[in-house]
Amino acid sequence: MKDNQNKQPVTVIGLGMMGSALAQTFLKGGHPTTVWNRTAGKADALARLGADAAGTVAEAVAASPLVVICVLDYEAVNAILEEAGDHLEGRVIVNLTNGTPAQARQTAAWATGRRAEYLDGGIMAVPQMIGTSGAFVLYSGSLRTFQECQPTLELLGAAKYLGDDPGLAPLYDLALLSAMYGMFGGFLHAVAMVRSQQIQAEAFTSLAIPWLHAMSASLPRMAQAVDAGDHRTNVSSLYINQAGFENFIGTCQELGISAELMMPIRDLINRGVAEGYGADGLSRLAELIRKPISV
């Protein structure tokens, strides 16, 4: 264990896979670390590594000026913080629980109303990546509070401050996850296509990975088109993509696999053409998504 005499004490609340990884990283960094979980047994392994296992939420919050909470949802966050009562005053609460921008703003207002400082965050890593160069964590809330805690928080991964609106971290978190799930969904659909013909999925990646890398180079140009509101293209119009997506659906039917991942994109492209944007590029879809059809 490193000398922790001058290290900021930290409390970690929530000891699932991610919370345990956070606590282990603080311990490795030499920070006196207090842990608490509603199921007390989850603290045993961390206690063997040198953590102090608190008996109650109030005890856990009182133990450290910096309290990091990572649980299932904001309902659990709010219930846990309610239990801490007056011990919240003067503490910095860093909430790394996945949630919505509105939930973050509501929790921030609740916490500051009890004289606590509040930062919301989004962890862009899996537990095994915490503390490595590949991890980064998004933060939003008070800049002063972030700067005071930054040296400690950077143990977890690169600390990306987004602004003083607490809702920004969950917004960026979910937007990045949206991009990730879209990529994974497209890849898994492609794998289902080739596996239907007994082609090995692993062998398919030798073509899929370089193709996806090449296509990712177009993302800045597409983003520029969205920001400028100029969706003219000399690459691939919605008209062209409309025909291509009918081939997707037809091939899925031929192969006997589901087309449910492709159909929402097909429907969005069809909507763009129907609204008169057939000559525009795919960047036009961002505008359509921002203006959903009234039901």
Image: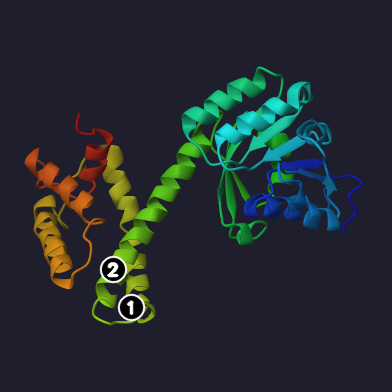
- Amino acid type assigned to the residue bearing label 2 in the image: Ala
Q: Secondary structure at mark 1?
A: helix
What amino acid type is highlighted by mark number 1?
Phe
**Residue wearing tag 1:** 204
Scheme of colours in the image: rainbow
Q: Nearer the viewer, residue 156 or 41?
A: 41
Q: Position of residue 118 (x, y in %)?
A: 65, 29
Q: Is residue 227 left or right of residue 127?
A: left
Q: CA distance from mark 2 to mark 1?
A: 9 Å
Residue at x-position 67% and y-position 32%: 80
**Residue underneath mark 2:** 190
Residue 249: % across, % down: 15, 61
Residue at 21% x, 41% y: name it: 230
Label 2, secondary structure: give it.
Answer: helix
Q: Residue at x 15, y 57 (%)?
A: 236
Q: Do the residues bearing badges 2 and 1 touch, measured as CB atoms within 8 Å?
A: yes
